[in-house]
Amino acid sequence: MKLILTFGFSGGTQRMLKRMFGRRDKAPAAAACGGCPLAACATGCEAAVLRMDCEHGEAHRLRGMGLFEGSMVRVLDSRNGMLLEVKGCKLALGQSLASSIQVLPVG
Amino acid sequence: MDATEIGGTIAAPPAPSPAPAAREGALHVALIGNPNTGKSTLFNALTGMRQRVGNYSGVTVERVEGRYRDAEGHPVTVLDLPGTYSLSASSPDEEIALGVLLGRTPGADAPDVVVVVLDAQNLERNLFLATQVLELGLPTVVALNQVDAAAAAGLRIDLVELTLELGAPVVATVATRGEGLEMLKQAVAKAPGLPRPGRRFELPCEAAQALAPVEDALEAGGLTPSAAGMEALRLLAVRQPGRHLAGIAGLDEAVERAHDEIEAAGLSARSLEAEVRYGWIAEVADRVVTRAGGGERTLTDRIDAVALHRVAGPLLFVLMMGIVFQSIFTWAEPLIGIVEGLIGGLGGWVASILPPGDLNSLVVDGAIAGVGSVLVFLPQIVILFLFIGFLEDSGYMARAAFIMDRFMRSVGLHGRSFIPLLSGYACAVPGVMSTRTIESPKDRLATILVLPLMSCSARLPIYALLIGTFIPPIAVAGVFNLQGLTLLAMYLLGTLTALGVAAIFKRTLMRGKARPMIMELPPYRIPNPRSLFLTVGHRASMFLKRAGTLILALSIVLWALATYPKTDAPAGASEQAAQEAQLAGSTLGQLGHAIEPAVRPLGYDWKIGVGIVSSFAAREVFVSTMGTIYGVGAADEGSTSLRERLRGERHARSGALVYTPLVAVGLMVFYVYAMMCMSTAAVVVRETGGGWVGLGWAGFQFAYMLALAYLSALLVYQGGRALGLG
């Protein structure tokens, strides 16, 4: 199926399909090099936060909400922005913010 | 003692120094806590109806203050600070919260006692803010709220141990049921006599050394040593002092130097505070919290499985919005009828007891009618805020914003802008007031500026009159009717323009990095009715106070314009003809004549000019002015005599028909865009900062909408004529 999609459609259509069905492509486990963006984590993934490359104010706000370097997060839903569980709370993050947070998936 | 016994409190060791002399007047208490901890419910339970709502000077952050008397009868004032996750000062709300606690917000003294409200179900995250507040060194009481829900979830919290760890008295409360309140009041009364709390953990040696010059600079700037310690650690992570620290000499340089030294020592300066705080908190939580069971799917998880479902979620959202929207229209209708009836009755009664003449007219047509035009908005405001309060308190609002975020982001707004825009269909006034749930000031401003473009219910009489009179009821494509389609087109035109203009504003005037979505989805809970009604009451009274006075004054001005100078009706003329002659000869009528050259390119004559001028205050007045100026007496949009008169009206000189379908469509487009509503303008002034700043934004909004209205009506009329229509 994937092959047909890859060869059968133009780049734009492929990108669109990838966005629609993209979560299947997401790596459930870490790349060996030590970390990936939080946005790349699939639903159900647990990860440790390594680095926060977002704006200082936002990073500090997130730390106040329990998301900080070294903390654990669980991805509850990765389709529509990111829905996370952090210290027992549900936290929704925008896609771009989730892309600027580097994590190490642990399971 | 049961670890989570309600009202259990442990006094810290007796104070070494005598308690400070009782201050003159009331004890000032500030309430601070994370959002969704039940802080506002606790505030309402403590203070009841004795509350005052206002704004902090220069910002649109709401300032809610209340008071109560403690067991000995001493007065206590309570300031409900904005909910915040940390003292990071990264939003106006958080800046106010920190500024007040440090005594550096103008108009708000530093509190005598701080009450930190914690959600017992989320102790670890809530303790982050608590440790920051405790470090400020103010007398502090910790209210451990929602202990009942925590117990139900299998969490047991040892109050004795927590009190010893924090160095401040901890009181267990259930604010929704009023439990633990007396204990809390006692603890607050005793707090000033207890030893001051402070930092309970050690910083790494290198960091402590590097931060010493920052603390010195802060102390030289007037902060207490303990507050300086907390602020130094915060500045290391945020590196933006914020308004409350403006003007402290050498601060920025000291922070930069400390940052470099700490990085050079191999530590991460940005995450240092979070690491040491959460490290200490994790140890404390280990000692204090015992978990029994837990881990099973909660009710919130089960509701979210539907509410956030890929298909069911948006459907549920549309259903919810449908109910809200429908109720603002239909439920408010009978209530508006009652308000109008009461105002009409009052006017009739006053008219009958005052001698006929100008005073009678001033009181009845000016003052009472003006007050009435304010009061008719109340039903919609109350219903909308009941819904918004219910959705907010139940926890659904955050889900709705999450679901709508992607769509709203495509026009540059936040998910939270959706509900204010939607309520704009009913009335822009509550819509503008409800933008307070939008955190980013730029998003909020953009939403306020485009909100009146949504066709509100006050436009409906104008659409109904013009469509009913000039658009033929032709069937289109079998099932549709041209009249209905025209109405739909007007609503769509307003909506699409609002979204388009918002996108333009966000890319030009209100540009700036879009604030990414960071939102907690709190557990669902049943809203507390008492809190809900208090909130709705605040909104209603704020509207009446802020908008009411201004609208009353402008109504009287408008009345004077329509009444003077007097024109004597020719002898034997009917009452209607006399009214027509009076309006034509009044200042308002002269204004209509004066603007005729400006509106002639739109196809209008001076009578429509009068209608437009008179409806500057409230667009629905257009219909009744038309009734007066065409001499058909009291008219509404369904009045047949007015419709016939409009269809037959001809230009005085050329003899051509004044109204063609093209003129009617152009006039409707004009009213889709024109911001003709004093009430909305008054609320916009308030909500965009008040004073000259607010006036500036309201003026800008009025001007751009009027320009849009004029140009679009011009385009419709002249374009239509060029195409041979009309």
Image: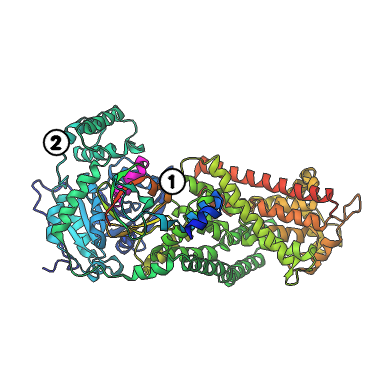
Above or below, B24 against B49 in this view is above
> Which residue was labeled with disc 1?
B515
Indicate yes or no whether the magenta region holds residue B59.
Answer: no
Residue B36 located left or right of residue B140: right
Of pointers 2 and 1, the one earlier in the residue sequence: 2
- The image quadrant that residue B10 belongs to is bottom left
Magenta-drawn segment: A54-67
Q: Quadrant of the N terminus of chain B?
A: bottom left
Above or below, B682 against B579 in this view is above
* Mark 2, other Cα within 10 Å: few <14 / some 14–19 / many ≥20: few
> Which residue was labeled with disc 2?
B205
Residue B27 seen in this snapshot: no
Q: Residue at x 49, y 49 (%)?
A: B444
Q: State the image coordinates of residue B198 (x, y, percent, origin top left).
A: 17, 45
- The image quadrant that residue B698 belongs to is top right
Q: In front: B568, or B617? A: B617
Q: Residue at x 19, y 61 (%)?
A: B171
Above or below, B237 against B326 in this view is above
Q: In front: B327, or B195? A: B327
**What kind of element bears circle 1?**
loop
